[in-house]
Image (tube, rainbow, N blue to C red):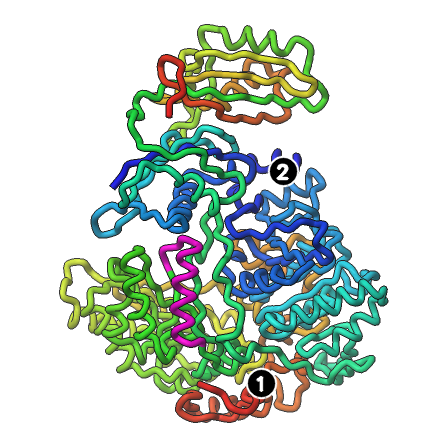
Amino acid sequence: MDKRLERILPRVQKPARYVGGEYNAVVKDLSTVDTRVAFCFPDTYEIGMSNLGMRILYGVMNEMPGVWCERVFAPWGDMEEEMRRCGMPLFALESGDAITDFDIVAFSVGYEMAFPGIVNMLDLARIPLHSADRHGLTPLIIAGGTAMYNPEPMADFIDIVSLGEGEESTVELIELHRKARQEGWSREEFLRSAAKVPGMYVPSLYDVRYREDGTVSSITPLDGAPQTVTKRIVEDMDKSYFPVKTIVPTTEIVQDRVTLELFRGCIRGCRFCQAGYVYRPVRNRSRELCATYGVESCNDSGYQEVTLSSLSTSDYPDLTELCDELEDFCAQRHVNLSLPSLRADNFSMNLMQRLAKGRKSGLTFAPEAGTQRLRDVINKNVTLEELLRSCHTAFAGGYNAVKLYFMLGLPTETDEDVLGIADIAARVMHEWREASPNKNRGVRITVSTSWFVPKPHTAFQWEPQISREEYERRVKLLRDAIKTKTVTYNWHDSATSVIEAVLARGDRKLCKVLETVWRKGAKLDAWEEYFSYDRWLEAFAECGVDPAFYANRRRERSEIMPWSMISCGVSEDFLWREHERAAAGVTTPDCRTQCSGCGANRLVGGKCHV
Amino acid sequence: MSKLRLLFVKEAQSSYISHLDLLRTFQRAFPRTGLEIRHSQGYHPHPLLSIVLPLPVGQSSVCELMEFEVTQETDGAGIAEKLNGGLPAGLRALDCYPAERPVRELADLRATLELEYDCGVPAGTADQLRELFSRPEILVFKRTKRKELAEVDIAPMLRRADWTEQTTCVRGDVVVQAQNPGLNPQLLAQAVERYLPELTPDFVRVRRTALLDDSGRDFR
């Protein structure tokens, strides 16, 4: 072990997250390696190790001969301070080597608030921050993940953005990079060539011009780069890589269990939901394969909990059958099944009986809005009756806690919609009185509201975010309307959501803001401990950028969005159609009921298998 | 059903695994061996395994003991080898055998202390350490379970301490009381800092080398 590291570790919190060596961590003999990849997650070990995408790509890359992919996480503040003090650069967990001279440095970016963390990690790794200041073929800085569907605020820092699912495209890119190094290409030659790999967006090959009012006037691809880059997907989930043998951390992480991915995409089409659009089309993994993977992963990892993961797990066609198939194994091995994403409209007694048998703690539903009118606007096709029936079933089955998630500030929201949330909580409470077999244990109803952030590639990408004052007024309105002590009300901090809204639909003018805010100390801004709203406001002011331009402005249909060169397969015409239907309060059926022609079917040869 | 004891090494990266995380790590390693750890009965069954004398985070050891019960009948033969295929780097099982001697017979533990001096060991350090650790009373501050600082006398818990000087390091071979109450050998370094501040080392490394019964023989 590095001597400097050995001396630092006794002084920092949770040192186990900085040493590697976990079961199934991949260590390769350097004499067999010609490509070293630093797979960076711009958040802590506990968060990053919980990310399934990272585990998949780690496995895919390490299966490539000659490639050694290692993990890198953002150090917590105390660790960063110690590292900077003793001059220790950012290092990879498997080898302990500084990543400064690695061939490829890849970032997995799931959240806009991680942007400053990426800049900070580049600096800790002693890699020049700007793409324009890096001259050789190495290190190549690439990034992917859902926050990269609008990578423009990061355009100055990233060489290549990998769009969509990376199982196949990452391999292609690494092979191309290896060829370029072997044949001695220039960096420019390589980037031009990489831009021709489907799914690869090279920001430096696009000339973006702005009008005086700040909106985009033109986006011009250079040197043969494509006009539109369409995301990549894995067509057949039964042939896609699943990390059966995966790293088992020796310190507790957030999702410390087997994550069994049942399907990708979502049939629902909630209009606010970026994941619902960008992961289209729906692709199911067969029940037999899911069961096999579940058993094999438990056997190898020794985990005693499996989460059946997807964007909407109760929409998996064979869910009860899958639970039944796993039942014997689970009972014998003391393994619990957990289902994170349940819909209030198809939660059944059948399913409930198959969930964790011992502990019946809490269930979570997300009605998202307080009235049927607003739920129709956002296309969350759940009715109050369905929600109450589901709660009734749960209470009757012995559950005594329900969490309800809502959003405030959705387009067209009125005070009536806000007060509707309090009404729902009261009706759920009433349902508990009717259904609970044991009222002595009491009930806990938790209402949580987050603040709606309009995201790119959604039907609401043209919509403004309401002002902070208005959001806080609605929070207060709801807080005053929830009177009973049984209902706990939590609301999301407003400042983070403002910055998230700015970055989500930002353009290249924000690159300078990101660098400025990082210089002022921003790093782990997804964490309350490190987030400072004032720091962001200062950075905006110094760069002459008005955050309201990005967060609170209504866009016209004709406006060129900063991310227009990127396609997730869903057409903008479809998104606009959904936007208009939202305004009219008309719902759109789910993909299984009727195809709405979003365009994502082109990614799977014309027909989705929903 | 068999009650077994596992002798294992915990060093390098694994010395940073905390006690609770270590239990979890072993819990997960057992299914890979085909052995089934016996679970407690009740509403929330949990696996029955316990570490005999938890090692402070950051220290290494070649003599850790863990007790556990498996549902199968076995004398433990072959278990250490099977476990070793599924353990993190720095954790290594040495032997597995039926738990016979009661843990209360564990009296002392032996450890090496490496006091590192980056600019060389100051002259006469070993002699001064010998003098310090033969005093009848050596007071250090120790954090209690209530997170308060309490002053404790470690002299009665210190059985033996031999010191050898090397170029940039002084090695201590010490034997301390293991339990009721036990003495963390790291506290010896704290005593140095308090009584001989000019000899405060730049870094201290602690490694457990043996568990002993009251006649000085290996406790297994």
Q: Residue at x 70, y 66 (%)?
A: A174
- Pinpoint residue A365: horizontal percent, then vertical percent: 34, 72
Task: Quadrant for residue A163, please give it.
Answer: bottom right
Compared to residue B60, the image places residue A198 above or below, namely below
**Residue in front for this viewpoint, A254 or B44:** B44
Residue for badge 1: A603
Main secondary structure type of the part rendered in magenta: helix
**Residue in front for this viewpoint, A524 or A409:** A524
Q: The residue under label 2 is which amino acid type?
A: Met
Question: Are discs 1 and 2 both within one chain?
Answer: yes
Residue for badge 2: A1
Inspect the magenta stretch and tell me whether residue A109 lies in it: no
Q: Is residue A188 left or right of residue B97?
A: right
Compared to residue B157, the image places residue A597 above or below, namely below
- Pinpoint residue A574: horizontal percent, then vertical percent: 55, 91
Residue B65 is tagged as: none
Residue A113, visible in the rendered structure: no
Q: Residue at x 42, y 23 (%)?
A: B211
Q: Chain of mark 1?
A: A
